[in-house]
Amino acid sequence: MLVVQKYGGTSVKNIERIKKVAEKTIQYKNQGNEMVIVVSAMAGETDRLLSLAHEIARFPDEREADVLISTGEQVTAALLALTLKEMGHDAVSLMADQVKISTDSSFGKARIADIEKDRVISQLKKGKIVIIPGFQGVDEEGNITTLGRGGSDTTAVALAASLNADLCEIYTDVDGVYTTDPNICSKARRLDRISYDEMLEMASLGAKVLQIRCVELAKKYNVPILVKSSYEEGKGTLVCREDRTMMEKVVISGVTYNKNEAKITVSKVPDRPGMAAMIFTALSDVNIPVDIIVQNVSRGSYTDITFTVAKADAKKAYKIMADIVKEIGAESVTMDEDIAKVSIVGVGMRSHSGIASKMFSVLANEGINIEAITTSEIKISCVIEAKYGELAVNVLHRAFGLDKQDVEEESEN
Ligand code: ADP
Ligand code: ASP
Ligand code: MG
């Protein structure tokens, strides 16, 4: 079998952990598999490199920032190759430009356009374990690019697709995808399987266990991903195509939580054609993605428009709106950074009714006010006050029957 494995930052955080990765790789190799290993930077390294750049400039040059932060993965790749060689196994590290992993030129959030697989394959045929740094690519001009935070997941899936791998495993610090972040809710349960669509929603709503782009690629090329822990043995979670058993069994698969957004409201916007277009064109012109949009019913000839953006873009968006308010004769703009977005996700929602009303009642029972709502076919998101975020996750998790049973509770039943 051809196996692609990816090890995240905590799984390679020191030499001891890198030795564990090497041992696991050797175990697979000895079973007759061809191994391609994708590594992240050692835990905390990307943040450390970024903060160095920020000591120099508030907005560091994006090309040079990518040259800097791509080094984290390069270090790990070399350390793992050295460890494997020391253990008597032939290994070779190949950087993105040696492979080559071609991307566009959007520094900091580049997208993979193509992967040349010949060099990887020829090294595998020579019996070598091939180690590739995640997160990095190279653009048409030969500049180093990076794929956005968490991007090593995407490197692994893109390689698995391109090499037509038999297995793609993502090793991290939790033993699979849970019904919600196990670090927020002690009752979170590991899922045996989750569909691409549900995982896509969960990733885009705040579950950082897999990068969104990685799940998009996995779905597009139908690469099943097995998410596992590098710390303990276990079955992990299979992220794969939806099947009938998944749809029938559970209505809600997960609850997510995101506190990285801010809410902006433009009040008393003249209610005439073109106003919303003007507001959102101004934001897209400067590449600010908007998440939730709510336009209220008009009062007379005015309406309020509320939307959310990433906190990192909030101040810029607010300033743009302040200018637009003057231009279109609206009343005012307000910003609230003290919000959280809680969401429930599940393919079963398509065929069940009453899910939204149940979600709203559960929040109301806790005295939590809902400030904005958005839905898709398989998710419902509510914006609430930030201080209620973790409480909301926990009560929704329980209300939708996702809590894991304690051993004592189980024996009572
Ligand atoms: P890595 O460094 O291995 O890429 P990440 O920190 O990016 O790991 O992702 C793993 C983390 O994702 C976990 O430690 C957990 O806190 C978080 N997480 C958020 N939501 C979930 C979820 N639904 N299931 C599992 N982990 C989740
Ligand atoms: N090292 C990068 C990050 O911290 C990429 C990754 O770990 O996936 O975001
Ligand atoms: Mg990650």
Image (cartoon, rainbow, N blue to C red):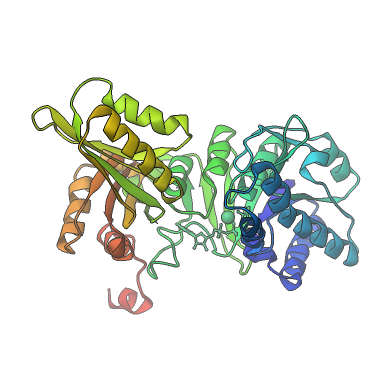
- How many numbered discs, if any? 0
- Residue located at (62% from left, 69% from top): 231
In this rendering, would 376 be left or right of 43?
left
Q: Quadrant of residue 2?
A: top right
Rendering quadrant holding ligand 2: bottom right
Specify whether residue 288 is in view: yes
> Could you tell me residue 34's position as x and y percent?
79, 48
9 or 87, nearer to the observer: 9
> Could you tell me residue 19's position as x and y percent?
77, 69
In the picture, the quarter occupied by the C terminus is: bottom left
> Could you tell me residue 353's position as x and y percent?
21, 42
Relative vertical location of residue 40 with respect to residue 408 in this rendering, above or below: above
Relative vertical location of residue 22 with respect to residue 348 in this rendering, above or below: below
Farthest left residue?
A: 300
In this rendering, would 316 be left or right of 19?
left
In this rendering, would 95 be left or right of 164?
right
276 or 212, nearer to the observer: 276
- Residue located at (85% from left, 45% from top): 124
206 or 261, nearer to the observer: 261
> Could you tell me residue 210's position as x and y percent?
54, 51
Specify whether residue 377 is in view: no
Relative vertical location of residue 207 with respect to residue 309 in this rendering, above or below: below
In this rendering, would 332 be left or right of 127?
left
- Residue located at (19% from left, 56% from top): 369
- Residue located at (37% from left, 77% from top): 407
